[in-house]
Image (cartoon, rainbow, N blue to C red):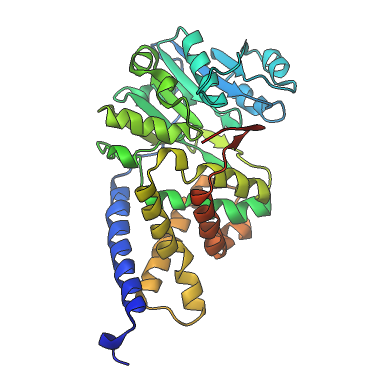
């Protein structure tokens, strides 16, 4: 059979691979203009700043977060925890706001964030998740970087302390640059449907954010960070993103199973992404991650599969500095790609609407 006589399915796959290669080249080319990682800033900002930490049943994890914020104005919004989260926060010197029950239409985290925003009187509010581990100098650096933007978020370094986490987690996170490209590019603003934030660390100018609607803009969303980025961009606001991996660490999950479940719930941002965009994302992931390695191992691959796998592995190397520790499991992570893409495809079709012991309607 000559090349011109190739079956229609093979020609369609090759055409799709070419489209995805071109799309990835355009997205990833922005990486040449990425901003330098955020550096610590000594002293205190000229403006007033408060750090708001929403927390629900975080007694086992919130300690390192609060330890890294000593000397700062910290408000922990206790989202009706059943453990000792509030007591521990008070012992660590934080002010604690006992969260009220969420009004109809709100999700637990968005309501906790909104309560913290309303309770603050500072010019700037930095929202940090309870499982983050900030370093001294982070908050002043964030506030300085946030100046040109209506909202700024920061990427953290991932602490994966078990081999299972290190095997699965990187294959999950690499889907982000494949779908969106690098976000920390000076002067670049995404179109609204492709905007994103990292909800682990968000910085806003309080009065301006309240005037724009605050967290009420995304009250019904579980992936509130992505939804907020898209709502603000649709309103013409500027969204910023910085790499704070040298100053901020996060331990998101404590096992491979937790990694599967946690990323499966949030990574596809199903409640902030339309069906067409979701289908496009899934197609890109299958072509860029799910198929090349199996096809090459089965000796059915082509030069296009080699090129796509090369991009995937180059991203894996580039993301290595975002993980601590790494070890052999990190470098073997790409072998989980087909399973990861299959899982995310399932979760795109059947979103998980559970969060912290609560289940929400669509």
Name of the residue lying farthest toward the right:
83
Which quadrant would the N terminus be assigned to in this image?
bottom left
Residue at 31%, 77% (x, y): give it: 11
Closer to the camera in the image, 30 or 327: 30
Name of the residue lying farthest toward the bottom:
1
Identify the image quadrant of residue 135.
top right
Residue at 48%, 64% (x, y): give it: 290
Name of the residue lying farthest toward the top:
121
Place of residue 334 in the rendered image (x, y in percent of width and height, measured from the top left): 53, 62
Placement of 7 over or under 41, stated as above or below: below
Q: How many marks?
A: 0
Identify the image quadrant of residue 16.
bottom left
Place of residue 140 in the rendered image (x, y in percent of width and height, measured from the top left): 44, 21
Placement of 236 over or under 180, stated as above or below: above
Closer to the camera in the image, 105 or 226: 105
Closer to the camera in the image, 68 or 268: 268
Q: Is 338 placed left or right of 251 in the picture?
A: left
Q: Is residue 137 visible?
A: no
Q: Is 323 placed left or right of 33 in the picture?
A: right
Residue at 27%, 55% (x, y): give it: 26
Placement of 353 over or under 7, stated as above or below: above
Placement of 11 over or under 165, stated as above or below: below
Residue at 28%, 88% (x, y): give it: 5
Place of residue 107 in the rendered image (x, y in percent of width and height, measured from the top left): 54, 26
Q: Is 119 placed left or right of 85 in the picture?
A: left
Place of residue 9 in the rendered image (x, y in percent of width and height, measured from the top left): 36, 76
Q: Is residue 80 visible?
A: yes
């Amino acid at each position: 059979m000559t090349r011109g006589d190739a079956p229609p399915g093979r020609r369609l796959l090759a055409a799709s691979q070419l489209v995805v290669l071109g799309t990835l080249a355009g997205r990833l080319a922005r990486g040449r203009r990425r901003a330098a990682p955020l550096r610590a800033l000594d002293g205190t900002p000229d403006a007033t700043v408060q750090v708001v930490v929403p927390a629900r049943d975080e007694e086992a994890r919130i300690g390192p977060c609060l330890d890294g914020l000593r000397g700062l104005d910290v408000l922990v919004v206790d989202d009706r925890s059943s453990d000792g989260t509030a007591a521990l926060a008070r012992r660590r010197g934080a002010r604690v706001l006992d969260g009220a029950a969420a009004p109809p239409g709100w999700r637990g985290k968005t309501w906790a964030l909104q309560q913290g925003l309303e309770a603050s009187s500072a010019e700037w509010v930095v929202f940090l998740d309870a499982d983050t581990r900030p370093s001294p100098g982070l908050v002043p650096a964030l506030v300085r970087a946030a100046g040109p933007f209506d909202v700024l978020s920061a990427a953290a370094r991932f602490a994966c302390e078990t081999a299972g986490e290190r095997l699965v987690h990187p294959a999950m996170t690499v889907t982000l640059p494949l779908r969106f490209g690098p976000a920390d590019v000076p002067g670049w603003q995404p179109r609204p449907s492709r905007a994103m934030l990292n909800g682990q660390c968000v910085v806003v100018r309080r009065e301006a954010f309240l005037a724009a609607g605050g967290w009420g803009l995304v009250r019904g969303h579980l992936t509130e960070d992505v939804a907020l980025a898209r709502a603000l961009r649709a309103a013409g606001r500027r969204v910023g993103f910085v790499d704070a991996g040298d100053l901020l660490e996060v331990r998101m999950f404590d096992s491979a199973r937790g990694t599967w479940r946690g990323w499966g719930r949030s990574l596809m941002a199903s409640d902030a992404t339309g069906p067409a965009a979701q289908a496009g994302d899934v197609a890109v992931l299958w072509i860029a991650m799910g198929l090349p390695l199996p096809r090459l191992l089965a000796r059915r691959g082509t030069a296009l599969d080699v090129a796509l796998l090369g991009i995937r592995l180059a991203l894996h190397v580039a993301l290595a500095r975002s993980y601590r520790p790494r070890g052999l499991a990190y470098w073997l992570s790409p072998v989980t790609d087909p399973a990861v893409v299959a899982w995310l495809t399932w979760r795109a079709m059947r979103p998980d609407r559970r969060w912290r012991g609560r289940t929400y309607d669509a």
